[in-house]
Structures are given as structure tokens and as C-alpha cells.
Image: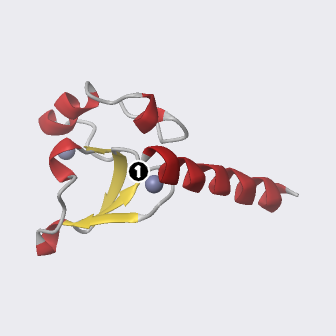
């Protein structure tokens, strides 16, 4: 039952990303950047193929000035079903 709910929530998140685009709130892992909402790979900064990075808010960067600035630009499209930042 719990898994079913989790799967449904994941589906809602994925559909939301299709409709309004991936959240600018994201997580990063060794240079890779993932959507904070659906978990899709958004960019690879090591291969400098991450166009979205300048406007991204990385969840782990709680003390980062760039992410702090970007946080001000977030809209409901970024925040809905995404992890809380700041
Ligand atoms: Zn997404
Ligand atoms: Zn940052």
C-alpha cells in the first residue's frame, strides 16, 4: 500500500515536470545534477553540458551565494513537490 502511494506520488511529480518543466531546485552528485522533483538527470557539469546550472538551486548548497541568489527567482513551478531549500 505504501509503495503504491509512493509510486503514485512519483508519477504526479514526473507528469508535473513534463507539464511545467523540471524544477530549478535540484540535487547534485559528483558533478551530475538531478531534478529535485522527479530525479531526472539534468546536466553534467564535468562535461560542461549543464546549461541550467547558472539558474539552479542545489539542495546541498545551503551556504552558497549563487544558489542563494537563484532561490529568489524560484516560482511555484520550481517549488511544487520539490525539496525545501533554505
Ligand atoms: Zn523533473
Ligand atoms: Zn550553489
Q: Quadrant of the N terminus?
A: bottom right
Ligand 2 located in image quadrant: top left
Percent coordinates x, y for residue 84 in the rendering: 45, 35
Q: Is residue 56 above or below residue 41?
A: above
Percent coordinates x, y for residue 81 in the rendering: 55, 40
Tell which of 60 and 67 is nearer to you: 67
Give the residue at the far bottom of this rendering.
Answer: 47
Q: Secondary structure at mark 1?
A: loop
Percent coordinates x, y for residue 59 in the rendering: 35, 45
Tell which of 13 and 83 is nearer to you: 13
Identify the residue at image location x=72%, y=60%.
7
Is the CB of mark 1 within 8 Å of ligand 1?
yes
Give the residue at the far right of this rendering.
Answer: 1
Residue 27 left/right relative to 67 = right
Identify the residue at image location x=47%, y=60%.
39
Total labels drawn = 1
Q: Can you tell which quarter of the image residue 6 is in?
A: bottom right
Identify the residue at image location x=41%, y=37%.
78
Q: Quadrant of the C terminus?
A: top left
Tell which of 19 and 35 is nearer to you: 19
Give the residue at the far top of this rendering.
Answer: 72
Residue under numbered circle 1: 22
Residue 49 left/right relative to 27 = left
Q: Is residue 37 above or below residue 71?
A: below
Percent coordinates x, y for residue 17 in the rendering: 49, 51
Scheme of image coloration: secondary structure
Identify the residue at image location x=16%, y=66%.
45
CA neighbours of label 1 inside 10 A, class few (<14), some (14 to 19), many (20+)? many
Amino acid at each position: 500500500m505504501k509503495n503504491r502511494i509512493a509510486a503514485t506520488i512519483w508519477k504526479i511529480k514526473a507528469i508535473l515536470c513534463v507539464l511545467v518543466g523540471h524544477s530549478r531546485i535540484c540535487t547534485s552528485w559528483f558533478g551530475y545534477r538531478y531534478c529535485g522533483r522527479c530525479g531526472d538527470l539534468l546536466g553534467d557539469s564535468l562535461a560542461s553540458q549543464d546549461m541550467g546550472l547558472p539558474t539552479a538551486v542545489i539542495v546541498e548548497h545551503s551556504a552558497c551565494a549563487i544558489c542563494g541568489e537563484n532561490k529568489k527567482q524560484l516560482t511555484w513551478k520550481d517549488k511544487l513537490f520539490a525539496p525545501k531549500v533554505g
